[in-house]
Image: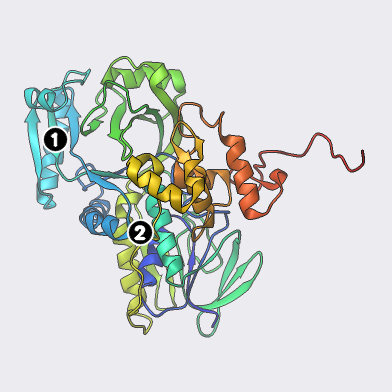
């Protein structure tokens, strides 16, 4: 056998499973078709860590509750910023109040603690900047925020340091059952393994018995606001959609705020701005850092173990709470694998991410110290985000280092400032070309078909 376990998909769940399994004496590989891991995560620097209150499906709520409870420990271990902040689910009408009461009673039955029903006066005391007429609200102390791609990359880096082989730019063509285990065929190789974990929703191979179609989907349109926006909120806010729209605001780990509108139809910039203003008041467009659109899935995530006796596990479904559920899903998949393969815990397991520096978060004393170690940390490339050449080089040279401009952006925050890369994009691409020993014309934004320069205008071979 080439491997004990093959993991298909380098998204957040695939990386988390690789991390959990890397604690044991197993030969593991992860196959990802893209240049980088964590490409399934939206490019926004904050994701809600839910607690199961908002979730209609009982199974999804249980996975959210389990994941929520694990976040403190896991974020501390793998060095990913995680912040607990309360959330307010807001009722604006009598119908909303009835919904809220049912949600509260359902949450109590599920055993969710630290939740409270508040009247309008108590809500305005917590959030005086609210622009809507509040009837009641359900307050939860359990919710939190985390940077999703930072979480996925941290999982991947630690798994890499513990021996997991990451086969990037390799696409799985088919999975075939053989006498003992499986043959996994990619566009580059053929591998044999004892067990396969398929974490790529929507991908079906000859071994799969049914095809998954995603139907429970709406559309999320959201703004990322600047840090100095004056109308910031302390808590995560949700409206119940009584006025034919669901709006929520989320503080980010880095200190700015996100405001989002969830609707069935795709909203453009102007429509999103109008609806978002209904919740937080008129938005100064000069304070809008970025505008994003992203699908909002509500499918049930299922850990399909119907073929586990043959050695095949598939994680099926997409859900908006996937980041919250990831620690619990990874733990459950790991336990299933361990019950089917003989292995032991590693004595030399590295349960810590390699050290890195964020120049913008350091004191002047700390900055001077690292500049003495490496002068490139004294060369600021992205002025808006205060990202240095040293950080960019580190992002490229780290385990599973960035190979695209988007990869550097996710790891360091470059181009996320006011100028959107107008001042630094060419510098970043030049550093990437230098560090990866490539021509500038070979550097891509995020995929094979996204070259930032198609070719030189002129080639000078003779003068």
Q: Position of residue 312 (x, y in %)?
A: 44, 72
Q: Residue at x 46, y 73 (%)?
A: 163
Which of the 4 quarters of the picture holds residue 298?
top left
Q: Position of residue 224 (x, y in %)?
A: 39, 30
Which of the 4 quarters of the picture holds residue 430?
top right
Quadrant holding the N terminus: bottom right
In this view, 78 is above or below 229: below
In this view, 296 is above or below 433: above
Please tell me which residue lies in front, 329 or 109.
329
In the picture provided, is 173 more to the left or to the right than 344? right
CA distance for labels 1 and 2: 29 Å
Q: Secondary structure at mark 2?
A: strand
**Mark 1 and 2 residues: CB-CB less than 8 Å, in contact?**
no
Q: Position of residue 6 (x, y in %)?
A: 49, 71
Q: Secondary structure at mark 1?
A: strand
Colouring method of the image? rainbow
Q: Which residue is mark 1?
A: 138
């Amino acid at each position: 056998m080439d491997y004990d376990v093959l993991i298909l998909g380098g998204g957040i769940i695939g990386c988390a499973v690789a991390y959990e399994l890397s604690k044991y004496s197993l030969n593991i590989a992860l196959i990802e078709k893209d240049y980088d891991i964590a490409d399934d995560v939206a490019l926004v620097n904050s994701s809600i860590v839910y607690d199961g209150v908002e979730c209609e499906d009982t199974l999804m709520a249980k996975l959210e509750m389990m994941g929520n409870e694990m976040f403190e420990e896991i974020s501390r271990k793998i060095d990913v910023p995680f912040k607990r902040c309360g959330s307010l689910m807001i009722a604006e009408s009598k119908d909303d109040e009835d919904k809220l009461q049912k949600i509260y009673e359902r949450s109590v039955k599920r055993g969710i603690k630290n939740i409270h029903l508040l009247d309008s006066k108590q809500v305005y005391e917590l959030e005086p900047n609210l622009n809507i007429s509040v009837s009641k609200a359900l307050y939860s102390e359990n919710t939190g925020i985390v940077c999703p791609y930072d979480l996925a990359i941290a999982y991947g880096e630690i798994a890499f340091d513990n021996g997991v082989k990451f086969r990037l730019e390799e696409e799985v063509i088919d999975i075939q059952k053989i006498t003992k285990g499986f043959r996994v065929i990619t566009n580059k190789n053929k591998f044999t393994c004892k067990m396969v974990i398929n974490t790529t929703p929507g991908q079906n191979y000859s071994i799969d018995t049914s095809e998954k179609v995603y139907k429970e989907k709406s559309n999320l349109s959201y703004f990322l606001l600047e840090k100095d926006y004056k109308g910031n909120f302390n808590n995560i806010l949700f409206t119940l959609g009584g006025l034919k729209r669901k709006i929520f605001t989320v503080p980010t780990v880095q200190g700015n705020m996100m405001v989002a509108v969830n609707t069935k139809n795709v909203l453009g910039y102007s429509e999103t701005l109008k609806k978002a203003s209904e919740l937080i008041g008129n938005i100064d467009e000069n304070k809008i850092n970025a505008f994003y659109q992203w699908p909002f899935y509500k499918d049930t995530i299922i850990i399909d173990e119907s073929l586990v006796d043959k050695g095949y596990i598939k994680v099926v479904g997409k859900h908006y709470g996937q980041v919250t559920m990831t620690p619990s899903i990874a733990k459950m998949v790991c336990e299933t694998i361990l019950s089917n393969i003989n292995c032991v815990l590693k004595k030399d397991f590295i349960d810590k991410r390699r050290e890195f520096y964020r120049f913008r978060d350091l004191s002047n004393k700390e900055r001077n110290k690292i500049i003495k170690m490496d002068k490139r940390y004294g060369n600021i490339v992205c002025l808006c985000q205060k990202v240095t050449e040293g950080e960019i080089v580190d992002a490229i040279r780290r385990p599973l280092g960035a190979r695209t401009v988007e990869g550097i952006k996710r790891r360091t925050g470059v181009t996320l400032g006011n100028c959107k890369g107008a001042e630094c994009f060419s510098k970043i691409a030049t550093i990437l070309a230098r560090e990866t020993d490539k021509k500038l014309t070979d550097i891509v934004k995020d995929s094979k078909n996204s070259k930032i320069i198609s070719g030189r205008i002129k080639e000078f071979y003779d003068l």
